[in-house]
Amino acid sequence: MSKTKIVVLQRKELIYTGILIGLGFLFILLFVFMFHGKEEKKGKDTAQYTPGVYTTELSLNDTLLNVQVVVDESHVNSVSFENIDESVSAMYPLLEPTLTDIEKQLCNNVAIENISTTEDNKYTQTLLLDAVKKALSKAEK
């Protein structure tokens, strides 16, 4: 005849074993989700914009200016005015130099939030940056 074997397990051992198995399973899931998420983010960073030419209107008193932004998939290629005439340039002399400064910074891969502003033409820069942000929001994927 076979002898009946009785195994005595203490409740503490069962609880500790269950907790360790649960933690091990959670760590495995954590590692899977961490490494899986990084691959998706890399793909999103490479294609930031839809390539093309985007414009937005900038209103200065009774004059409407078109701010034109040319982008490719990953960065800004140029920022310019589309329809500026001499009278507007004479009336607002800081417009073109300020836009040129913004264009240089954007073309050097500076994020639009990190563009440096000067106290001399802060209002003009803020006005132009808002217009450029509107154009870039049209280009974002």
Image (cartoon, helix red, strand yellow):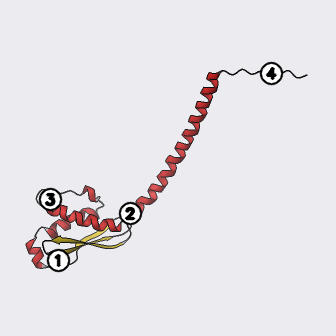
Q: Image check: 12 left or right of 60?
A: right
Q: Determine the residue positioned at 35% across, 68% down.
A: 139
Rendered view: 63 above or below 101: below
Percent coordinates x, y for residue 49 in the rendering: 37, 66
Q: Kindly identify which residue carries mark 1.
A: 84
Percent coordinates x, y for residue 90 in the rendering: 8, 74
Percent coordinates x, y for residue 21 in the rendering: 61, 34
Rendered view: 112 above or below 68: above
Q: Look at the numbered disc 3 and give the secondary structure of its residue.
A: helix
Q: Determine the residue positioned at 29% across, 58% down.
A: 111
Q: Determine the residue positioned at 51% across, 48% down.
A: 35
Q: For this rendering, which residue is in front, 5 or 27?
A: 5
- Residue found at the very far left of the displayed protein: 91
Percent coordinates x, y for residue 88 in the rendering: 12, 75
Q: Kindly identify which residue carries mark 4.
A: 5
Q: Amino acid at mark 2?
A: Gln
Q: Kindly identify which residue carries mark 3.
A: 122
Q: Amino acid at mark 3?
A: Lys
Which mark is first along the chain, 1 or 4?
4
Q: Look at the numbered disc 2 and give the secondary structure of its residue.
A: loop
Q: Kindly identify which residue carries mark 2.
A: 48
Quadrant of the drawing holding the N terminus = top right
